[in-house]
Amino acid sequence: MGKNELEVLKGIDFSVEKGEFVAILGPSGSGKSTMMNIIGLIDDKTSGEYLLDDVSVEKFSEDQMAKLRNDKIGFVFQKFNLLGRYTALHNVEMPLILRGYTKVDATDKAKEMLVSVGLEDRIMHKPIELSGGQQQRVAIARALVGDPELILADEPTGNLDTSSGEEIMEILIDLNKKGNTIVMITHEREIAEKATRIIHIRDGVVIEDE
């Protein structure tokens, strides 16, 4: 921040195994979003080492990092981050098109993912025509469509009412039971307890791993 250096994470050291559902729990300002951005290859760290699938990310160029993000990581954001001018179908098929899939194959797989999250009757709707819970289902379908090894969920229920939030958590729990690795950021203890492991972070330090 200008000439001021702000140390956000301080000696963080943990690992996530394949198939785990980990919640990173902490209040605002604890460093959890910074940690999520580093795990997701969005932000770079200033020191230390990060291994993704047992490979140090230091080895990769920006283009390779972008490919890693698209191939290995699925993102689910609090604000959904859907493209408002496009239908649910096009929002979900876009990552596949960027990978080089044919339009037909991308469309078929996107439809399959939307059906899997219960949106078979909303495929051609635009985000503005969907409820918050439905938009988050589209975001989950988009995260899953590329068969990522890791799903990162940043406050996935933060903009939803209680009922919709519970539905989204049930989808994440079901995905984990099917073998998906999930790391979820949250400041709500009740939401964190839906995961199988909770890492507590405060002031940039892991204070408990349960």
Image: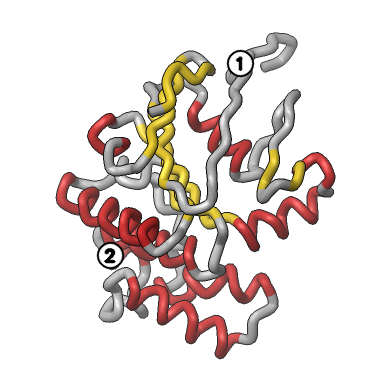
Q: Position of residue 192 (x, y in %)?
A: 31, 36
Q: Secondary structure at mark 1?
A: loop
Identify the residue under disc 1: 10
Residue at image location 52% in from the left, 75% down from the top: 93
**Please, which colouring scheme is shown?**
secondary structure
Which quadrant would residue 26 be assigned to in this image? top left
How many tags in the picture? 2
Residue at image location 34% in from the left, 42% down from the top: 195
Which of label 2 and label 1 is nearer to you? 1
Whether residue 110 is situated above or below residue 175 in the rendered picture: below
Q: Residues within 10 Å of mark 2 (few under 14, many from 20)?
A: some
Q: Residue furthest left?
A: 163
Amino acid at the residue labelled 2 = Leu
Q: Position of residue 63 (x, y in %)?
A: 79, 55
Q: Residue furthest top?
A: 4
Residue at image location 29% in from the left, 31% down from the top: 188
Q: Alpha carbon of mark 2 to alpha carbon of mark 1: how far?
A: 41 Å
Identify the residue under disc 2: 130
- Give the quadrant of the N terminus: top right
Q: Residues within 10 Å of mark 1 (few under 14, many from 20)?
A: few
Whether residue 76 is situated above or below residue 105 in the rendered picture: above
Which one is in front, 49 or 164?
A: 49
Q: Position of residue 15 (x, y in %)?
A: 57, 36
Q: Secondary structure at mark 2?
A: loop
Q: Is residue 53 left or right of residue 105?
A: right
Q: Position of residue 51 (x, y in %)?
A: 69, 41
Q: Residue furthest bottom?
A: 104
Q: Is residue 184 left or right of residue 56?
A: left
Residue at image location 60% in from the left, 40% down from the top: 39
Amino acid at the residue labelled 1 = Lys
